[in-house]
Structure formats: C-alpha cells, structure tokens
C-alpha cells in the first residue's frame, strides 16, 4: 500500500485534483446528520433526541426541485434509527440523496474511552479505538440502509494522525473533514487554518481524496487574510468592524450564522480564486425548529429554506452546477479503483 499523508498536517506541496478539461465549477451540499443534543451542555452518551429525522424528507424533496443531490453524513444514532431507513431509503434508491459517515465518538460504540471534550474529536482516540468505532458505524450504515458509504467527515471536524490510514483500509475514497481556515486546537482539535481550500490528494496513489469544507476570505484585504485574520481572533469587535466595513471577513458556506448576502460574497470570492468545487455544510437538527441556535422557530425554518432558494439561484446565475459523490468519483476515475469495496475490511 502506498504511503498516505495525515489529514491534519498541512500538506507542504499539495497535489491538487485536476478535473477534466472544460469542467465548470460545481457545488456539493453536505449535512452533518446527527442526533439532537444541547450544544452548550457537557457531552453525554445518552439523552439525545431523534425527532428531526422525518424532516430529512422535506429537504430531499426541496433539493430535488433544484436538481441538487444532498449528502447526508450520518452518525451512529441516526444510522441505527429505524426511521432513517424509512425516510431516506426511497431517496437513496432513486439517487435523490447520498449517504456518508460522520463519527461522533461519545455516542458511537464501543465505549472504551473516557468521556471528555478531547475524546470528542475522533482523531484523538487511540488508533484501535478510532478504527473500531468507525467500522461499527460503517457496518451499521451498510446493514440498516443497504449502502456502502464512500465519504467521511469526522465529527467536530476532528480527524487525527491515523484517520487517513483507517479510511484507506476500509474502502473510503473521499474525506471531507478539513474545514479550511478554522482552528480547533484551543479545545483539543486540529488546526486547519493554513490547509488548502481546493480538493487535493491524500497519498501518492491518488486513492484518497480530500474535499475541504469551503470557507473563504472576503473584503478588500482578503489577499492578506491568512496573515491578518488570526491576529483578530481575540478582538471580536475589531473583527466585526472590519467585516462590516468590507475590509476582511471569513465566510464559511453555510446557512448557519451566515446571511445570504454574506454567502453570495463568499461564492463570488471562491469563484474569483478559481475554486473548482464549493462544499456547503450544515447540521441536520437545523431542519426542524428548536434544536439549534440557528433555527429556533417555524419562522426561522422558513428563513432557512429561503436562504437555500437565494443561494441556489445565485449559483445558477454564476454557472455553478450541483454535483454528487457519485459524479465526482466517476469524473476522477475513482469509481473503478478506490470505490471498490474491500472484501474483508
């Protein structure tokens, strides 16, 4: 097996993906599909909810009306809930939605590790524990949803030094754990502040692909964002003032906490940088009122869907087409190689 590189280490000389000539920029909608829990409270292994699962169907239908195939990256409570297969099964069979893996260690057996914030980043776990949790989740998805997932996002974006090797040995072709321009090291997580924003290969044999979750710098000073923005982290008022003055802002492509105007500026900045793929993300509990800070009321949910309508329209005007894991894999020749499921893994 060819040597694979670590997901959390900034690649010194990244080998960026080369899409076929003439391929227009594309976008992917990803959902961190997880149980409902109190984000402000200490983590617990139990006491979570699964009330938002029925709301997945509405989002699939909504996306279908725009020709978009949403990617549900699901964790263990979602994967093992009978309602998930009932709600998503028909969409998966019809190619209207896709499934990936999303590991929340604190609710994913086996429970051999201490419950702590440090261990909530799956890449911080001992290699054997991370591997066993991942395999249990992957196998649960296979058994209950009838699909072999080919893409992974670590819970809390918490990849680790062993994650790439685990993905390779278990037949995963694509990782999307890198949230470019974000640093989680203050709470024990990885630092992706200087990671690339365009897709790149993890390993010399090009069998594991990294799709960073898209974040860009906007504003007049965006070219110097990597140098300036980290210095503003302890000065939220100055950071807010610079964003308000359109001097410098960090814009993740998400409906959670980002206005449509900000997101459109982010899209335009990404296209100005010639990023070939824009990866959007949000958390599934935002698909129903009362489970996240972003969607507290039915009116907030209406705003949430209006956000997507406006963004899909802007993407269409800019000539950015929706894509899927299947289409990406086929365009890069992964369908016959890395997507082949290992018999014994």
Image (cartoon, helix red, strand yellow):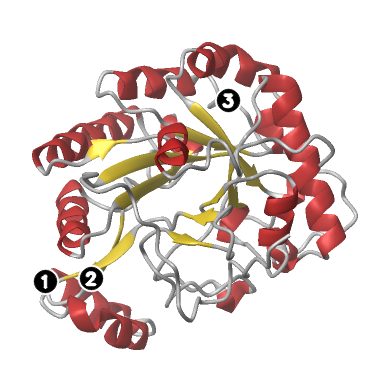
Q: Nearer the viewer, residue 160 or 189?
A: 160
Q: Nearer the viewer, mark 1 or mark 3?
A: 1
Q: Secondary structure at mark 1?
A: loop
State if disc 3 and disc 2 touch (CB < 8 Å): no
- x, y (%) of residue 199? 41, 58
Give the mark nearer the N terminus: 1 vs 3.
3
Give the mark nearer the N terminus: 2 vs 3.
3
Which residue is under mark 1? 246
Q: Secondary structure at mark 3?
A: loop
Q: Secondary structure at mark 2?
A: strand
Q: Crowdedness of circle 2 by 10 Å Cα count: few (<14), some, many (20+)?
A: many
Mark identifier at residue 307? none
Which residue is under mark 3? 51
In which quarter of the view is residue 135 placed?
A: top right
Q: How many angstroms separate mark 2 from mark 3 (CA)?
A: 35 Å
- x, y (%) of residue 32? 52, 42
In which quarter of the view is residue 246 placed?
A: bottom left
The reply to whether residue 251 is in sight is: yes
Q: Is residue 21 left or right of residue 265?
A: right
Q: Is residue 151 above or below residue 96?
A: below
Which residue is painted at 52% across and 42% down in the image?
A: 334
The reply to whether residue 289 is in sight is: no
Which residue is painted at 83% across and 43% down in the image?
A: 109
Which residue is painted at 23% across and 47% down in the image?
A: 25
Q: How many angstroms separate mark 1 from mark 3 (CA)?
A: 40 Å
Q: Quadrant of the C terminus?
A: top right
Q: How many angstroms separate mark 2 from mark 1 (CA)?
A: 7 Å
State if disc 1 and disc 2 touch (CB < 8 Å): yes
State if disc 3 and disc 1 touch (CB < 8 Å): no
- x, y (%) of residue 154? 61, 54
Which residue is under mark 2? 249
């Amino acid at each position: 097996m060819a040597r694979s590189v670590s997901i959390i280490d900034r690649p010194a000389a990244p080998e960026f993906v080369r899409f076929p000539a003439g391929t227009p920029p594309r976008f992917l909608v990803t959902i961190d599909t997880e149980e409902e829990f109190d984000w402000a409270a200490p983590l617990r292994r139990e006491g979570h909810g699964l009330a938002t699962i029925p709301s997945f169907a509405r989002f699939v239908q909504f996306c279908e009306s725009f020709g978009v195939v949403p990617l549900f990256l699901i964790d263990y409570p979602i994967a093992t809930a009978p309602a998930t297969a009932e709600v998503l099964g028909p969409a998966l069979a019809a190619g209207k939605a896709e499934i990936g893996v999303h590991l929340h260690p604190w609710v994913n057996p086996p429970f051999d590790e201490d419950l702590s914030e440090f261990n909530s980043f799956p890449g911080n776990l001992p290699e054997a524990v991370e591997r066993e949790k991942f395999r249990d989740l992957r196998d649960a998805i296979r058994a209950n949803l009838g699909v072999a997932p080919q893409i992974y996002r670590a819970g809390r974006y918490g990849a680790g030094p062993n994650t790439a090797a685990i993905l390779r040995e278990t037949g995963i072709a694509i990782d999307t754990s890198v949230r470019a321009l974000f640093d989680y090291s203050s709470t024990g997580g990885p630092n992706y502040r200087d990671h690339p924003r365009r897709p790149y290969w993890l390993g010399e044999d090009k069998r594991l692909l990294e799709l960073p979750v898209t974040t860009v710098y906007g504003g007049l000073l965006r070219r110097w964002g990597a140098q300036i923005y980290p210095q503003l982290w302890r000065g939220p008022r100055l950071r807010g003032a610079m964003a308000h003055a359109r001097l410098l802002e960090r814009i993740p492509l998400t409906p959670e906490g980002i206005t449509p105007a900000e997101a459109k500026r982010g899209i335009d900045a990404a296209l100005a940088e010639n990023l070939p793929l824009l990866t959007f993300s949000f958390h599934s509990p935002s698909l129903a009122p009362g489970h996240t800070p972003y969607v507290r009321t039915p009116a907030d949910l209406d705003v949430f869907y209006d956000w997507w309508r406006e963004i899909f329209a802007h993407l269409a005007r800019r000539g950015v087409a929706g894509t899927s894991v299947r289409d990406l894999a086929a365009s890069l020749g992964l369908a016959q190689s890395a997507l082949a499921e290992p018999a014994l893994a």
